[in-house]
Amino acid sequence: MASFTPPPGTADIFAPEAVRWRRLENTAATVFSCYGYGELRTPVFEYTEVFQRGLGDATEVVQKEMYTFEDRGGRSLTLRPEGTAGVMRALCNTDVMNGVEQRVYYYGPMFRGERPAAGRRRQFHQVGVENVGRVAPLIDAECIAMLMDYLARVGIPDAEVVVNTRGIQADREPAEQLLREYFAPRLGEMCPDCKTRFEKNLWRILDCKEEACRKIIHDAPDYRQAFSAESLAYFEEVKRALDALKTPYREDPLLVRGLDYYVHTVFEVTHSSLGSQTSIAGGGRYELYLPGQSRPVPGVGFAAGMERLLMVQDALGSSPESPVSTPFYLIGLGADARLANLELAGELRRRGIPVALELEERSMKAQLRSANKTGALLTVVRGDAEMAAGIAVVKVMATGEQSEVPAAELAKRLDDFYQTAQGI
RNA sequence: GUGGUUGUAGCUCAGUUGGUUAGAGCGCCUGGUUGUGGCCCAGGAGGUCGGGGGUUCAAAUCCCCUCAAUCACCCCA
């Protein structure tokens, strides 16, 4: 039975579940377009260098998690591990470089060769947005507010936003200096990971979870005192705007985030209902070097993990509605009746009315059992006798009442019933 | 990549210290009504006990390997 399971970290998503996915996607389209965003569909694989340059060679994602392969032309390609780099690649053919604002959203599968765990798959799905070309605190705030708007619309009203500022590139050096001086003498008491982070990726020390490290981190000086006045003012304005937008947030100087390209605002959205993977969305402002460009492009954006949104919905019990049942079931006894039913079903379906019907030779009892299982409201029954008389029996399943309807009027009668049922 | 747990029917799971034809509930199919559902009753289909190897007279059960799922770490969405 386990002979044909999909590869590790991937999954088949069948109808009832797929409806929930479509809701996440449709709601994204609805909400984001209200903010002036348009959909952008980029390829699911890109030249490998798009991600290497975009995310930074040192990033863990690039180093060990990418699905990279060579195609028949000897090109090195990579299944996208995230959405931003591909979006930027697409956008560099537009006039964003000249300061024209581009607002795009996307959703789709991403691929990372990690060990699967709760809320983490190898093919996972993100819905995200990028606002590219302009720099302003209000844009950052609007972006965060839009994310919260979206979450509320998919049944997650109580997620928590954590924000922080990373300053600009020029702020980084003095701030790192400050941290280095603080951590250097204390490295002996810290975990092995932090020791290598100290050399390779100093900032990641800040979100180390080791007990010993946390204490030391907690007492670290606020590196933001080394930031320029402009950077701090930018952040203040972002927060003021969030207040004005009535978007509650928590400020956390330890929020750093994994990718190198962030500047100014960074944020993460978490939900308490999740176990170890508490993060359901994350993003921030960035400066990205597009292939073939000498200047970086500014932008702000976020990505939300769809699997995790579904997990939160489950925890909240806000995963709704099983799909609508088909209202009609057509029972046919005998070849002629079944053929007539097939015709009738076609007629109704062309009008957009869902119909289920029996196409095989089965007993009345079996067909009614099926009708019952589909949850049909009305059942049309006909056999040789009805065919000869030019009528059909219409049965109301809830009450068991039956009435005869001329065959010629069937489509209209069912249509009318359907329209009024829809109205209720 | 590291560690823990798990793997028996479509689903949820039993299976006693190894012992003959491997079970239940739900679901599915058929019948109980020459053409009437839900409830009830009866019957039926469906399993290489994840896979491979080993120990044994005998393995779903014990040992090894492997695959997969799951959880945690790591990383992130």
Image (tube, coloured by chain):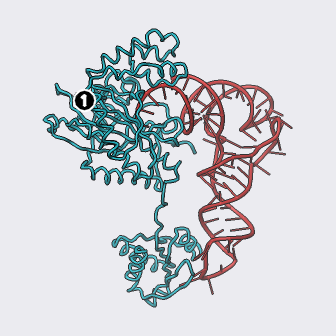
Chain colours: A cyan, B red
Between A411 and A213, the residue placed more toward the observer is: A213
Residue A259 falls left or right of residue B68: left
Which quarter of the rendered picture does the C terminus of chain A lie within? bottom left
Q: Position of residue A347 (x, y in %)?
A: 35, 75
Q: Quadrant of residue A112?
A: top left
Question: Is A204 above or below relative to A302?
Answer: above
**Residue drawn 31% across the image and 44% down it:** A106
Question: Is A165 above or below relative to A401?
Answer: above
Q: Determine which residue is flagged by label 1.
A: A288
**Residue drawn 23% across the image and 44% down it:** A103
Between A26 and A132, the residue placed more toward the observer is: A132
Classify 10 Å Cα crowding around label 1: few (below 14), some (14-19), many (20 and above).
Answer: many
Q: Position of residue A391 (x, y in %)?
A: 45, 88
Q: Quadrant of residue A422?
A: bottom left
Which quarter of the rendered picture does the N terminus of chain A lie within? top right
SS at mark 1 in the image: strand
Question: Is A183 above or below relative to A78?
Answer: above
Check disc 1 and give the amino acid type.
Answer: Leu
